[in-house]
Amino acid sequence: MEAAYLLGTGGAIGAVARYAVSEALPADRFPWATLVVNVVGSFVLGLVAFGGAGEGTLLFVGIGACGSFTTFSSFSFAAVDLWEQGRHWTSAIHVVGNLVCSLGAIGLAAVLLGG
């Protein structure tokens, strides 16, 4: 039961934070909110994972909060939507940018924590 509480509470916080970011950043020309949440979420997950967090913290922050904050579905939808609009370069930049920046964020967390 404790695991469900940790996951649910973390998930609720992450979902509200995700919504706040999407409201704060423009999406008319480029899906900035999706890029930001994926990079920030990757960095936070890296900090938690490489920082030696306990099981409860991993459930709350890693799976709950980061899991609902980051968004593969919005990332995928935006990539296809941009492509179908004929904005092929923007779609490609979105895909490569998310991948490179998110992996870079996890790498930065690993370096900062000596992982």
Image: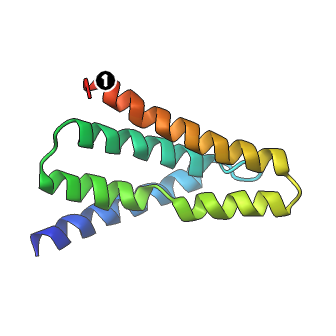
Q: Report the residue at 49% width, 55% height from top.
A: 20
Q: Report the residue at 26% width, 70% height from top.
A: 8
The amino acid on which the numbered mark 1 sits, given as a three-letter code, is: Leu
Q: Vertically, is 106 above or below 83? A: above
Q: Report the residue at 12% width, 48% height from top.
A: 54
Left or right: residue 104 versus residue 94 is: left
Q: Vertically, is 7 above or below 17? A: below
Residue 60 location (% of width, % of height): 22, 57
Left or right: residue 105 versus residue 75 is: left
Crowding near pointer 1: few (<14 within 10 Å), some, many (20+)? few
Left or right: residue 86 versus residue 2 is: right
Question: Which quadrant of the structure image shows residue 66?
Answer: bottom left
Q: How many marks?
A: 1
Residue 89 location (% of width, % of height): 82, 44
Residue 71 location (% of width, % of height): 50, 59
Toward the viewer: 101 or 60? 101
Q: Residue furthest right?
A: 86
Q: Report the residue at 56% width, 65% height from top.
A: 73
Question: Which quadrant of the structure image shows residue 105?
Answer: top left
Residue matched to label 1: 112
Quadrant including the N terminus? bottom left
Give the structural element (helix, strand or loop) at label 1.
helix
Q: Residue furthest bottom?
A: 1
Left or right: residue 103 versus residue 61 is: right
Quadrant including the C terminus? top left
